[in-house]
Image: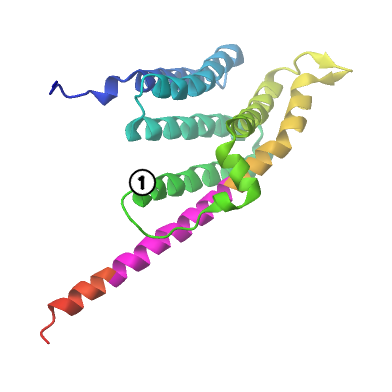
Amino acid sequence: MSTEKENIFLFVPNLIGYARIVLAIVSFYYMPTNYVIASWCYIISVLLDALDGHAARHYNQSTKFGAMLDQLTDRCGTMGLLVTLSYFYPRYMFWFQASMAIDVACHWFYLHTTVLQGKTSHKFIDMSGNPIMRVYYTNRIVLGLMCLFNELFYAALYLLYFTPGPLILGMSSFKLLAIVSAPVAIAKTAISVIHGYVASLNIGVIDVAERAAQREREAAKKPQ
């Protein structure tokens, strides 16, 4: 029986994750000045996001570290793009700021609640009972398309700052893409808010249970 300790930091999906970070950093550097380099680095990083999940399943290398690395890279990548959009479109800075805050805060709550749920036996609020949310949770195609169109919305706004792109019936293709993908981006933001709200309620479940257990322990210590 082998006693060799696994180095999860060198797992294939995590190596892909490190490459995504490098690509994101390069993209951030060129975003204000060179949309070609920035776009290609950003696009490749997004495509690798789909690849690392397949690699984790194929090599049986799914880890909590990898899941957190993937989530943080996603959030930071989108946040970097939104910072640039705030610079390009100052009139809409508030909405980009709100999008960043919702995206980061709600995913942070959701991710940490998921970790805490694995360590407890409490009864949590489960949104998968809702038919709309059940499709979002269980259908990889729906989830993938929503994530894709969310990225396309912000990417289209970014590219539109530099170039209208190919014309379709006399209309900028990037503007058309932004219009088509906007409803999906809004819907995904709304789902993030729901995730954050439900995660907050579930953390509350943990807090109430832990405080009740603490009171029981304190009561047991008191002399009868």
89 shown above or below 11: below
Left or right of 18 on screen, residue 81: right
Give the colour scheme shown.
rainbow
Given residues 154 and 143, the one toward you in this image is 143
Residue 184, can we see it? yes
Q: Residues within 10 Å of mark 1 (few under 14, many from 20)?
A: few
Q: Position of residue 153 (x, y in %)?
A: 67, 30
Q: Residue furthest front?
A: 1
Q: State yes or no: residue 168 in magenta.
A: no
Residue at left offset 40%, top offset 17%: 19
108 shown above or below 144: below
Question: What residue did someone put label 1 on?
Answer: 115
Given residues 26 and 190, the one toward you in this image is 190
Magenta highlight range: 192-212
**Image quarter hosting the C terminus:** bottom left
Left or right of 204 on screen, residue 86: right
Q: Amino acid at mark 1?
A: Val
Given residues 150 and 214, the one toward you in this image is 214
Q: Position of residue 71 (x, y in %)?
A: 44, 34
State the predominant SS element of the stretch in magenta.
helix
Residue at left offset 56%, top offset 46%: 192
Residue 28, can we see it? no
**Numbered circles on residues, count:** 1
Residue at left offset 74%, top offset 22%: 174
Q: Considering the numbered disc 1 on the image, is that residue within a helix, a strand or a loop?
A: helix
